[in-house]
Amino acid sequence: MTERIGILGGGIGGLACALALARRGIVAEVFERAPEIGDVGAGVQISPNGAAVLRALDLGPAFEAAGVESRAVVVRDGLVDRDLIRMPLSGGAFRMLHRADLIAILADAARAAGVEIRTNHAAREALADGRPCLRFEDGTEETFDMLVGADGIHSVLRPALGNREVAFFTGQVAWRALVPGDAPAEARVETGPGRHLVHYPVRPGVVNLVAVEERTDWAEEGWHIPGDPDALRAAFAGFARPVRALLDRVEGVHLWGLFRHPVAARWQDGASALLGDAAHPTLPFLAQGANLALEDAWCLAAALAAPDRMAGLARYEAARKPRVGRAIAAAEANARNYHLDGPRRRAAHMALRLAGRVAPGAMLRRYDWLYGCDVTQP
């Protein structure tokens, strides 16, 4: 009898895992709560570690044709419209694209490889005791030999594996928006006291922006909560004219509170396993959420295809935990550095300008451990 593998979540990690399994001759089913795999989300940045997985999945040409090649990361003083440091990128492995375009590439390839994507399947509960089972909102149930939870920060499989840690509000909220306009082929970080804004092109004539503000009040967690464009503009009213002009083009925006979730204590039990945000929700200060999900997907598929699956899953969890923990810590450090005020801000900006004149690539080399890792290589 053919083994049944279910993947809960039709996002980047879930689709990549299904495709990686299919490339190994293992067919899985993907269950997605949305009515269709459609044009949702905003921008993502794919760095070389994520690009390596896409190329190993035979998606190199499609990936390279999508979005915009990023030529630099520029950290700026958003209050006075001045570059602090420009860190050049090379090799074509950094790309900025709309999340929906990456999802479409993965979904098309997965379907072509024989993966069934079952939309309109919202899971209400997962059971991981014995053969894993999903219970859906419509009252139906599905049972599997192996279940993968790629269902994000509100994962139903994560607590079923015994992870019941409580997330806490970081004191930061974020807005996401897509605005019309052309922009340089680079990611720009506009820093200011207690807030910062990142913007970059994702399609011809479309710019993605993510704006983060420190707050004491709580905001609900989730990507799709409608926000007020005027409140966004008011929060960044002290920034220089180019930033304000960009925000003047915002017609619709989504607001979400940033919560810190611990890395899951338990990722797998031999018959169920987590990947991506279901295992390690990542704050958006290092642009690694999609990249770490791609890495997880590749490594988990290799574990599921191993002759000794139990040992493979144990190796997957043991190898991934330290790496994602380090990435999460680096993202949190970025958030603090972007929001400095007073003398610390002036000192940090002076150091960045000096580094930009003397060794502009040195800042990025601090992340060689992250970008230079290729999980597809033995």
Image: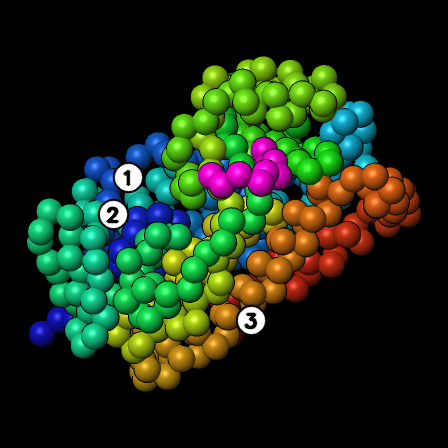
Q: Which residue is mark 1?
A: 37
Q: Which residue is mark 3?
A: 322
- Whether residue 68 is situated above or below residue 154 in the rendered picture: above
Is 214 in front, or is 80? 214
Type of the residue with mark 3 = Pro
Mark 3 or mark 1: name the one nearer the start of the chain.
1
**Residue furthest out toward the front:** 217
**What residue is drawn where x is 62% and y is 26%?**
235
Q: Is residue 35 left or right of residue 307?
A: left
Type of the residue with mark 1 = Ile
Residue 23 visible? The answer is no
**Labelled pair 2, 1 in contact (Cβ < 8 Å):** yes
In this figure, what is the number of numbered marks? 3
**What residue is drawn where x is 61% and y is 49%?**
286
- Whether residue 306 is situated above or below residue 223 in the rendered picture: below
In the rendered image, which quarter contains the N terminus? bottom left
Is 353 in front, or is 1? 353
Span colored in magenta: 211-219
Q: CA distance from mark 2 to mark 3?
A: 29 Å
